[in-house]
Amino acid sequence: MMRAILFALVMMVSPALAQHAHHKGPNGGPMEDVAGVHVELVTAGSDMIIHVTDEAGKPVSTSGFTASALVTAGAQKDTVKLEPVGNNQLKGGMKAAAAPGSNVVLMIKTTAGKSGQAKFKI
């Protein structure tokens, strides 16, 4: 009986998790919800850019936000400090371009005092 209940729960939750994991933002990067905003991770060479929007997809000013990201690929680790740039972006430089399959953990704090983490795989 417990196996049947567990199986049913897994089957109900799995599509939602899979759908969320494949959600791409308008700039082609993966998106996550964190600290009351939507964040999209985009890398270009050694640049890391986080686009920040609200639930309706409208830009959110990043002035006053603080953020950093930990990029890991195997034993390689890189901590990236992200600074507000433009209207709704946070930007920082990595030591080198992120390798495919790298993991990124974004730590962010908004001007409203909300903070959180988002995890990405590139």
Image (spheres, rainbow, N blue to C red):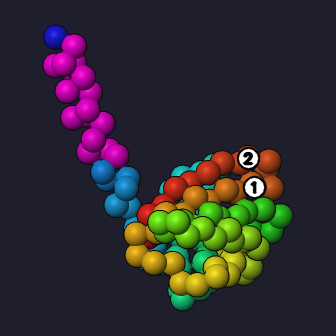
Give the CA separation, mark 1 to mark 2: 5 Å
Give the image location of residue 22, x and y in percent.
34, 61
**Of residues 22 and 68, which is closer to you in this image?**
68
- Quadrant housing residue 104: bottom right
Quadrant housing the N terminus: top left
**Secondary structure character of the magenta stretch overall:** helix
Q: Residues within 10 Å of mark 1 (few under 14, many from 20)?
A: some
Give the image location of residue 76, x and y in percent.
55, 70
**Of residues 87 and 65, which is closer to you in this image?**
65
- Quadrant housing residue 50: bottom right
Q: Are marks 1 and 2 in contact (CB under 8 Å)?
A: yes
Give the image location of residue 122, x and y in percent.
44, 70
Q: Is residue 105 left or right of residue 107?
A: left
Give the magenta part as a residue range: 2-17
Membership of 43 in magenta stretch? no
Membership of 9 in magenta stretch? yes
Q: Is residue 29 left or right of residue 45?
A: left
> Residue under circle 2?
114
- Report the residue at 83% width, 64% height from top: 64
Q: Secondary structure at mark 2?
A: loop
- Report the residue at 58% width, 58% height from top: 105
- Report the residue at 31% width, 53% height from top: 19
- Tag of residue 110: 1
